[in-house]
Amino acid sequence: MTMEAQSPANAALTRALPGWMHGEDLAALILFAVLAAIPFVMSGYVVYILPQYMLLGVLAMSLAILWGHAGIISFGQAAFFAIGAYSIGLVMKYLALPVNSAYVGILVGAAGAALAALIIGYFLFSAGVRSAYFVVATLALSIIVEQTVKSFSSITGGWNGLYVDRMTLTFGSLLEVSLFDDVPMYYTILAVVIVVYLAVAAVMRARFGKIVVGVRENEDRMLALGFNVPAYKTLVFGLSGLLAGLAGAFYATHANFAHPSNAGVLFSTQVVIWVAIGGRRSLVGAFAGAIIVASLSNYLSSIKAIQNYWPLFQGLIFIGVIILFREGLAGAFESLFRKQKYGSAS
């Protein structure tokens, strides 16, 4: 008997999966199918709030590719998220364009966040900044963006925040779809999330992603093999910023609001918690971790007896997961699946 042997059930499941589908893809398929079914069985607040949590999941994925794949932890994801949020708000408020201003705002937000990440990454990684020093630099970035949007209050609204209209989908002059109602907005954001997952998963499984993982495993060896490690770090940081900015833009138009706290250190810390709990090396794990923790936080904060202590509960959950499941919930499920697979081998 060999370790590669599988039970008939596991072998049948493996044969049933297409050649391109990974185990994570199967988990994503199940999760997205559940999310797609929710508006059919639930309504009201759940359908309203879940798109925001899905976008927080995209923000978590932006850190997962950076931390889990490249081994670079960042406390500046909120800064890129805020760049996206304020970009769409400012474009929709101040610019009269012949095209859909929401589309332009989303592009500006995502591209602006990506450009900021590329510029910052270029200088930091070219200078050999690593580990704790990079963490401090990204913390400073969050503080800078937060203080900037507060300082230009005549434009950004300062501490009062910036109101952002809900976007409308337009297809030239042929069709216009309002996203004012929650259900159309729900499925629009779900579609965006699915496209983002597929695109990021494809990139990280391509040669670029494998090189990034190589940098995580042994940066000095990758340098010795002739790879331009600072360039790859910069590019993955830029991709991370793009995803965070995209999430921020859609979040602002859904929530009708952009606020300086969107760029704050506390928010960036929450992103790290989501990814650590969900699993930093799994896109689906990070995505699900954000939804689970955000939902749990919302529920605990609504209980009057403990509403002032829910951050404590969140912190205890974070500590517990780190102690018990070092690779997060996704890593725990993967380990359980492997034990079941080889335990039932015959």
Image (cartoon, rainbow, N blue to C red):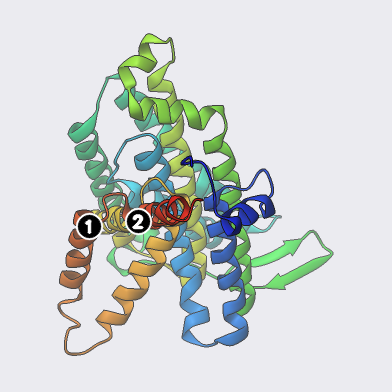
| Nearest to the observer: residue 226 or residue 166 | 226
* Left or right of 180 on screen, residue 159: left
Q: Which mark is residue 324?
A: 1
Callout 1 amino acid: Leu
| Nearest to the observer: residue 237 or residue 291 | 291
Residue 8, percent from left and from top: 60, 56
The residue carrying mark 2 is 332
Residue under the point 53% across and 70% down: 165
Is 82 rendered above or below residue 303?
Answer: above
Is 133 rendered above or below residue 42?
Answer: above
Q: Is residue 64 visible?
A: yes
Instruction: Single out the residue that lies furthest toward the front.
Output: 1
Q: CA distance from mark 1 to mark 2?
A: 9 Å
Is 139 rendered above or below residue 158?
Answer: above
Q: Quadrant of residue 298?
A: bottom left
Callout 2 amino acid: Ala
As helix, strand or loop, the secondary structure at mark 2 comes to helix
Mark 1 and 2 residues: CB-CB less than 8 Å, in contact? Answer: yes
